[in-house]
Image (cartoon, helix red, strand yellow):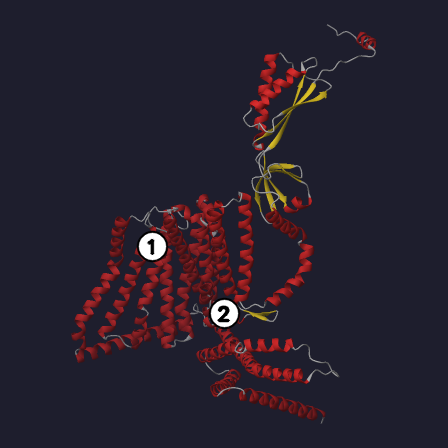
Amino acid sequence: MAIRGMTSRALACAGAFVVLICLWVGAALAQMNEAQRAYYQDWLDDAERAEEVIDEDRASTAALEELRRQLVIYRQDFLEARDVNSVRIATVNSQIEALGPAPEAGQTEPEEVAALRANLEVQLNHFRVPVVVAQEAFNRANGLITEIDRTIRDRQAQELMERLPSPLNPANWETASGEAIDLFWALDYETGNAFGDARASGVLRYELPQVAGLLLAAVVLIVLGRKLMRRVGDAIQVRLNLGTGRVLSFFVSLSGVALQVAGFAVLESAIRATGLIGLRGEFLLERLPVWGAQILLLVWLAGRIYPKTDAPSIIPMSPPRRAAMRFNFLLTSIVLVLFDTKQTIVHLDRLSPATEAALGFPIILLGGAVLLRMRSLAQGARGDDAAASIELGRSGLLRFSAAMGLMGLVIGIAAPVLGALGYVPLAEALIFPALYTLVLFSLILILEGLASDIYGLISGKGEAASESLVTALVGFVLAILALPLFALIWGVRPADLSELWARAMEGVSIGGTQVSAREFLMFIFVFAIGYAATRALQGALGNSLLPRTKLDPGGQKAVISGIGYIGIFLAAIAAISSAGINLSSIALVAGALSVGIGFGLQTIVQNFISGVILLVERPISEGDWIEVNGQMGYVRNISVRSTRIETFDRTDVIVPNADFISGTVTNYTRGDTVGRLILPVGVAYGTDTRKVEAILRDIAEAHPMVLASPPPSIVFQGFGADALDFEIRAILRDVNWILTVRTDMNHEIARRFAEAGIEIPFAQRDIWLRNPEALTQTNASKPEPSA
């Protein structure tokens, strides 16, 4: 009875909930127009049908993919509908906030304000209903898509782990050979019937000229297409002289491959025009251009990476190993063509699992052998040529090639073993994606080399362009763009990639603001434009406008740096606003982080503020001769965090900007380069002091770097312990030459004093012994040395 009571209460609650949902949906529908009601009703019907299909789990994978595609369309529409009334909702919210907080219980507000608040709340609810409906429908569609994806992935996992009859079991060979023979006779039977019908109706006779023309065109394109394009390329190279010609060679060789692929397409049309192909032959014939393209493109890739000539290859190898790698690429193309042929036959005739395993295992064995052979050749090349290994390491390919080699070793051994045990689908899911990965990686290397050659041709750098930053960035972008292709190769469904993109476009909520990939890309785009405009403005000011003003170089640098900081700040604000990010939310986050920044980055912030003060107040400028913290030298650069000083011994000293604000700084050249020289001079006692003064004055006044006004002065400092002390005090035109002036004056003083017979004394000391007799007694007591 208790259980029955609980069940009845649960049913009652569920019924009440359903009634509430129905009432809410009814209210939502009442606020929509006719088209919106019809669309929403269609959505409800499709959502219920999708739930039934998922629960029954009887639909095929193709049907689930189609259902998923329809749900994705609904989800995208609901995602866009969530922002329909966002502007109006924000406006009404701001109006309600302007009225102040709502009165608490027991409090009242003026009737006019209360009526206005009630009216605004009604409008707000009216605007919010479509948003809430869209959000609910979006969540429902998202959940259904997730369930479909889970179902499809479970089915894929089951198919992948399916164990077929072992191809090594002789008991299965009879079945496989029988079905293969039946397939051959079915193709022969269809072809014979088609030939009989064509001969009876006379169609073959009428179509013979067209078929002959198509066959001739196909042979010419396949056999002579590459040679023809090579001659065209040689003629263009002779006429235009495009440097090394590697860029032209790339496009010429690729055009030759395109002509050959077109030849296979013409060959397909010629065979089809005969009318001798049956139903099964039609399916196989459709794959002929694809098979030809696979073989030709892989041979072309091998030729570009491992050229036959002595030209440097993208991956350094000796000529014999290059030839072996080219042959391995040819085998790879054959393996991929055989695998595609086997897949076409299996899907065409629905062969038994035993036959499927027997047909797939030899191809798996050949693919594993190709992977192991490639790894062996790559390792041998690194072992034979140390310079090649160093070059690979510099280019960043060494680590990746080692990873590819390890993948080839593991898969090349594991896949045949799994195939022998009957796990043919799993073995195929390993071996063939690995081969396609090698092909895609080779294509990325070739495109990166092409970008390097184009950049070298345009910039004139030639071979040096391969080491440039542009080439590295191109390689990085190519690797990023190739990630979806690698994912598709390894079995990721296109729907999974689109779902990942949809989640990125949906974004995440940060501080009440929805941030998605679109907003992020918009932020990057606007900020990049603002940053580029700031740099362009700085360049224009630094090269054109500021040099024509009266500002000194330090002031010009301060103006340019200030404009840079302001421009970057404005670019960031514009980027944030264009991305739709609420600045008030950013302010809240910044306020929450300010405490941590204040403690953890206190020194950095202090130096930053000090750098701004230095650029604004300019107590020092670039080129000034200063002394700070015992370091003397020239200011070479002032940044926001530190200042670089070049000392007189040509070493760089990095001084934090805070030291310039809190410490004592001596600037010898602030404002101008005029400075004073003090040169001490000592003469022997007994020298005529007036004569010394006259000689020193003549020397000071005769030097070209000494200013005449104020005139130099000679100071008789006093009587030193060893000499009469004088000083030359002179004002120099440029204090930066003080050491040169000091040297010149010292030379002149030595010459003039020598001519005048004036002695420059040096320190002398008289030593007095208190008891010399003690030393005499000590020497007498010492024994004489023996002979």
Residue 722, quarter of picture: top right
Residue found at x 64% / y 13%: 758
Q: Is residue 661 left or right of residue 489?
A: right
- Residue neighbourhood size for the residue with mark 1, other residues' Cα within 10 Å, grouped as few (<14), some (14–19), many (≥20): some
- Residue neighbourhood size for the residue with mark 2, other residues' Cα within 10 Å, grouped as few (<14), some (14–19), many (≥20): few
Q: Which residue reaches farthest front?
A: 709
Residue 655 is at least partly visible in this image: yes
Mark 1, residue position: 250
How far across and down, in percent of the image, does residue 634 sit? 58, 38
Q: In this view, does 31 lie above or below 693?
A: below
Mark 2, residue position: 501
**Does the CB distance between marks 1 and 2 fall below 8 Å?**
no
Q: Residue 342 carries which label?
A: none
Q: In this view, does 728 lie to the left or right of 455?
A: right
Determine the secondary structure under disc 1: helix
Residue found at x 40% / y 53%: 449
Q: Nearer the viewer, residue 183 or 251?
A: 251
Determine the secondary structure under disc 2: helix
Residue 369 is at least partly visible in this image: no
Q: What residue type is labelled 2?
A: Trp
Q: Is residue 544 left or right of residue 591?
A: left
How far across and down, in percent of the image, does residue 78 sit? 51, 79
How far across and down, in percent of the image, does residue 486 sit? 46, 63
How far across and down, in percent of the image, does residue 549 sit? 50, 46
Q: Nearer the viewer, residue 652 or 260?
A: 652
Q: Nearer the viewer, residue 295 or 37?
A: 37
Q: Which of marks 1 and 2 is nearer the N terminus?
A: 1
